[in-house]
Image: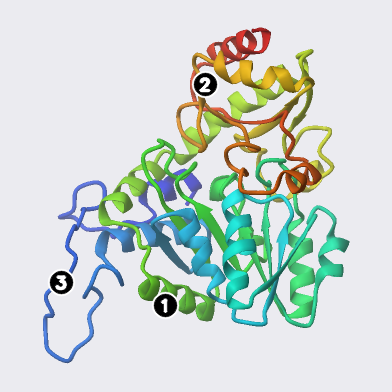
């Protein structure tokens, strides 16, 4: 069954009495049918019908066995980090979402978990960072916001050599364009707020794995700590996933044309995109994914142009998110990565002139015209 068909039907139980789409079951608790016997649904923090439909669908799309949904992408990341204990060490990609950086550097060290940030585009850096107490390698590929590409198979090979797990944040490409579990990764994380939702109206996160033990631990973290996804949001996300391929195709097509436009604009210093010729990971991207995705970044030659650029946009919107039908632009240094010390941001390449663009599905002529007039002003 092809991807778009699975996205439409993959999470549904075939029932002649059931109309199209999942039913929203808003119950917080369910009647115990028979004293002393277990049943699927008891209390909605543990499990509920609509949430379960979504989890089945996400497992299907990622070619995984176990999927769990959370009230945010950071909720999903937090659940994965609960796999580790005091004295453990994790390796993390140097270019990661600001929230991931914050939770790993500021929160979990309080519980005795050590970390090392490395440039994962070079596998030797990962190998060199492995310690006796290393338990996991956590990467984003492509990364946020520099669009760095990490070799998933190469990372998995290092992990297996040392008996540790590989965690891949697949938010930017979605299971439509990239399937990390098929490449050997142990865990996939999504901020489902982004492309999976696609309409800027849901906050959600997903964890998918093929490992039964890992799945049981993630489920325990979900039931114990909470942070679950509501039935209504689960239903909204099921609905949104039905159009994932259509939306991603349209947004990626717009992205490729905008990348070309920005590459040829005199005010732009460089454009960062996974399949661009200047990305050293281009060949890896093309080998492990079926596209470059619908996010890119660029640097302006003059820092003084940054504020006027944002202030003069008419169609694109300055906002912190991405992946919806509307085009969003953001400024990593002051929005998504503002918690990172300035010197560290600069060292990582998150300069003041860096701007991230997440094209939507508007007409490409209108988008180019908007960016053109904003750059000129």
**Residue at image point 62% right, 27% down:** 255
Between label 3 and label 1, give the one nearer the viewer: 1
**Element on which disc 1 rests:** helix
Of labels 2 and 3, earlier in sequence is 3
Q: Which residue is mark 2?
A: 316
- In the rendered view, would you say 77 is above or below 349? below
* Quadrant assignment, res 151: bottom right
How far across and down, in percent of the image, does residue 184 sit? 67, 66
* Residue 344 vs residue 73, the one in the foreground: 344
Q: Which residue is mark 1?
A: 220
Contact flag, marks 3 and 1 (Cβ < 8 Å): no
* Residue 239 vs residue 214, the one in the foreground: 214
* Residue 249 vs residue 300, the one in the foreground: 300
- In the rendered view, would you say 22 is above or below 81? above
Q: CA distance from mark 1 to mark 2?
A: 41 Å
**Going by the image, does 127 lie left or right of 218?**
right
Q: Residues within 10 Å of mark 3 (few under 14, many from 20)?
A: few
- In the rendered view, would you say 245 is above or below 357? below
Q: How is the image coloured?
A: rainbow
Q: Which residue is mark 3?
A: 30
**Element on which disc 2 rests:** loop
How far across and down, in percent of the image, does residue 123 sit? 84, 60
* Residue 284 vs residue 195, the one in the foreground: 195
Of labels 1 and 2, earlier in sequence is 1
**Element on which disc 3 rests:** loop
* Quadrant assignment, res 100: bottom right
């Amino acid at each position: 069954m092809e991807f778009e068909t699975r996205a439409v039907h993959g999470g549904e139980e075939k029932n002649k009495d059931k109309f199209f789409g999942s039913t929203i079951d808003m119950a917080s608790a369910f009647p115990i049918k028979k004293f002393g016997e277990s049943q699927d649904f008891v209390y909605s923090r543990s499990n509920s019908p609509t949430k379960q439909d979504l989890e089945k669908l996400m497992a299907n799309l990622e070619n995984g066995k176990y999927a769990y949904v959370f009230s945010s992408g950071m909720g999903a990341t937090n659940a994965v980090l609960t796999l580790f204990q005091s004295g453990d060490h994790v390796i993390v990609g140097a270019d990661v979402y600001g929230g991931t950086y914050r939770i790993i550097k500021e929160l979990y060290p309080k519980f005795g978990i050590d970390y090392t940030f490395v440039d994962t585009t070079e596998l030797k850096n990962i190998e060199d960072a492995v310690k006796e107490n290393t338990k996991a390698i956590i990467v984003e590929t492509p990364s946020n916001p520099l669009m760095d590409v990490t070799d998933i198979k190469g990372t998995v090979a290092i992990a297996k050599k040392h008996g540790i797990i590989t965690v891949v944040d697949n938010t930017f490409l979605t299971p439509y364009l990239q399937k990390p579990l098929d490449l050997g990764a142990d865990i996939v994380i999504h901020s489902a707020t982004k492309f999976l939702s696609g309409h800027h109206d849901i906050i959600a996160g997903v964890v998918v794995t093929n490992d039964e033990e890992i799945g049981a631990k993630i489920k325990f973290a979900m039931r114990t700590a909470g942070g679950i996804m509501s039935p209504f949001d689960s239903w909204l996300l099921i609905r949104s996933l039905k159009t994932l391929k259509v939306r991603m195709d349209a947004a990626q097509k717009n992205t490729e044309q905008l990348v070309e436009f920005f590459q040829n604009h005199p005010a732009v210093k460089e454009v960062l995109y996974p399949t661009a010729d200047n990305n050293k990971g281009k060949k890896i991207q093309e080998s492990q994914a079926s596209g470059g995705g619908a996010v890119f970044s660029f640097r302006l030659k003059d820092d003084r142009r940054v504020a006027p650029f944002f202030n003069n946009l008419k169609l694109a919107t300055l906002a912190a998110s991405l992946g919806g039908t509307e085009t969003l632009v953001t400024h990593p240094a002051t929005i998504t990565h503002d918690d990172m010390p300035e010197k560290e941001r600069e060292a990582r390449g998150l300069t003041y002139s860096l701007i991230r663009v997440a094209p939507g599905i508007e007409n490409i002529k209108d988008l180019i015209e908007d960016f053109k007039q904003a750059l000129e002003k």
